[in-house]
Image: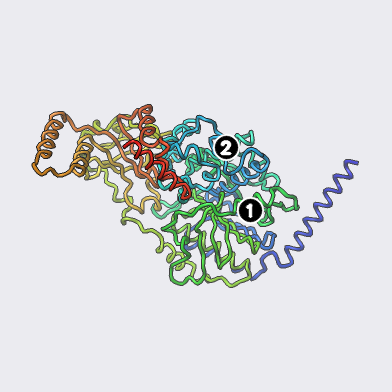
Amino acid sequence: MDLRKTMEGFCKTYVYIVILFLVGANGRALNEVEQRKVDRFVLDSMNCGRIPAINLGLVRDGQIALTKGYGTADARDRIRTTDSTVFCLASLTEAFTALTLGKLLSRNDSYSWDTPVKEFLGEDFRLGNKYITNHVTLRDLVSHRTGLAGGDGIILTKGMGQSELKNRLFFMESHTGFRAKQTESKILFTLVQAALEAIGGKPWDLLVKEHLLNPIGMTLTKFLHEAEPSYRKFAVPMIKVNGNLTHVPWDAVNSINLAGSAGSLCSTAYDMSKWIDFLLKDGKNLRGHTVVRKDILAELFEPVTILDKSNDVRSDDFNQPGTTVSYSENRAGLGWTLGSYRGYKTVSKRGSWLGYESQLTMIPSRRVGVFTSFTGQTGNKADAIKSLISVYALDILLDGEPWVDVPRVCSTVDEMVNAMPKPRSSYRRTYLRTDISPHRPLQSYAGSYGNGLYGRLEISVSNDTRNALNLDYGEQGMYRLFPTQKLDEFYLDAKTGPLWFTTRADEYIRWGPILVSFNSTKQEREAERAQRKENEPQAEDGGSEEESEESEDNEDDEEDEDRISGIAIPSFDRTLTPIFRRDFVLKQAFKDVQESHYEECSGASAVTIPFLVLALTACLNFISHRL
């Protein structure tokens, strides 16, 4: 009896697959002409960007139209790229995390996307602003609309573990207003991961497997912490150094595991085509079984906030010459980016992480979708190539004529790059000088420096390199500092190790020299005096000037020495410059943040518009009563 049922199930599945294949062959898969066009466009794009390996997956009318690999996944072992070659997805991971969370929330009557996060994480959960602490929700975190920023360098350097990071999130600073617009933060996504695990009762990756990957049939999809460095199905991550393709160390790539739910998933063109098909079929897998309800998916595709993309050509449609179609990305959903192409609503997501680039774009109303991933190109040029491949493939799937033809691929890529932000200088690594003598004894810079969010770093005098300091932060952050001709300014140069390429890769250094600056007590005193003079009213009888001069004389008497007090490292963060101080004390830092930011009224600037007037009125009433 059991054997008969097993055979019946097998036969039904087999017949269903055959039907899918026949239907797909009848107009769903790319025809020969379409595939030749796509092949030529992809190959020309690879040539323009000197890209060694690309994966491509196309879905049309609810069927997989094409899955294919191009180029060489591993040049050392001469392994060709196929549709089963694994590429890391970076931020595309967020969509899987968000949908798993949405599915679990739908089964729980006590929680929703708008439940305050502290209900999941407990009363010990604190951010630096009391209002945000009490009101931030899962919807805010997944759409990146908290306004908080900072901490990029913690991930790359493996600066600390998740438990310590959770406590140090208290020191994250506001970059924009709360719920004003999207401000991406991977380290804040660790709170999404913690909430998911609190609801599901298991590690987040097991929940994603159980609720999505396994039922969809994404058997080739892996998490980075599962993959061995020698895993032969992976495309080797590559980056350009002095124009030459160079391998990115696996230890560097694996650092994203600190915020794994925001970036540690890796997949193939074949599996990602299943994912697109599942999304376009409103949550049904290839066998027609419902994995996720349609309404749960729909909520992820609804706009939550606007994007902060003032320097992106897609924020206000393409604006370079020769573009004849509309294409924009200007709103954020839950784990997704929303926009339009040729007047159709698009749902998309892009990812970028240390040698891996990826993009998924869908037009749900036309039931078409494109996934592409590659290695070897980064930055603005990678963004341009990902976008062009996606829209070219969409045009093919829409049975239309692509607006960009193959002979114009390279020129169109260049036009798009020229419309993006330009480097500040023509700096190249050869400009790094190691023969400049320091302005102070190197020992005067040595010591331990602290920062509320980042923790501690150590500065020491190098024993093996003349006129150099060592900067050590976290497990992987090992750098040398070479003095420039400016007082207390140093070049930052990564040592041999997992992050050696971070100060050498073409994309990183094209923006100018990577510098750090030390602050001194003298500079701080001068800044304080200038601030006082600016704030003090001019006295008619000159009395205040005499008092000011007397005050400065007293300060001069106290100034026995000019000491190094801190160090600023802009390259550690995309939005804010972390400043590490010698006199940093964690307990005092907590107190300072509480006094300056942890009052309810101080959250008024972060409140959404409907509550802004009420909060402002309350503060004014409070002040008037005090007066």
Residue 562 picture location, percent across and down:
19, 33
Which residue is at a point 39% across and 30% down the rendered structure image? 590
Question: Residue 319, relative to residue 431: is it above or below?
Answer: below
Q: Residue furthest right?
A: 1
For the rendered model, the colour scheme is: rainbow
Residue 141 picture location, percent across and down:
52, 44
Which image quadrant is residue 157 in? top left
Q: Amino acid at mark 1?
A: Ala
Q: Secondary structure at mark 2?
A: helix
Dot 1 and dot 2 residues touching (CB under 8 Å): no
Residue 235 shows up from this direction: no
In the image shown, does 506 or 449 lie closer to the viewer? 449
Residue 371 picture location, percent across and down:
59, 57
Q: Which residue is mark 2?
A: 195
Q: Which mark is residue 551?
A: none
Which residue is at a point 53% across and 35% down the rendered structure image? 118
First in sequence, mark 1 or 2: give its number: 2
| Mark 1 surroundings within 10 Å by alpha-carbon count, few (fewer than 14), some (14 through 19), many (20 or more) | few
In the image shown, does 438 or 620 lie closer to the viewer? 620
| Mark 2 surroundings within 10 Å by alpha-carbon count, few (fewer than 14), some (14 through 19), many (20 or more) | many
Q: Quadrant of the N terminus?
A: top right
Which residue is at a point 20% across and 44% down the rendered structure image? 534
Q: Secondary structure at mark 1?
A: helix
Q: CA distance from mark 1 to mark 2?
A: 21 Å
Residue 77 picture location, percent across and down:
55, 48
Q: Quadrant of the C terminus?
A: top left
Relative to 368, 6 lies left or right: right
Q: Which residue is mark 1?
A: 298
Q: Amino acid at mark 2?
A: Ala
Which residue is at a point 47% across and 46% down the rendered structure image? 611
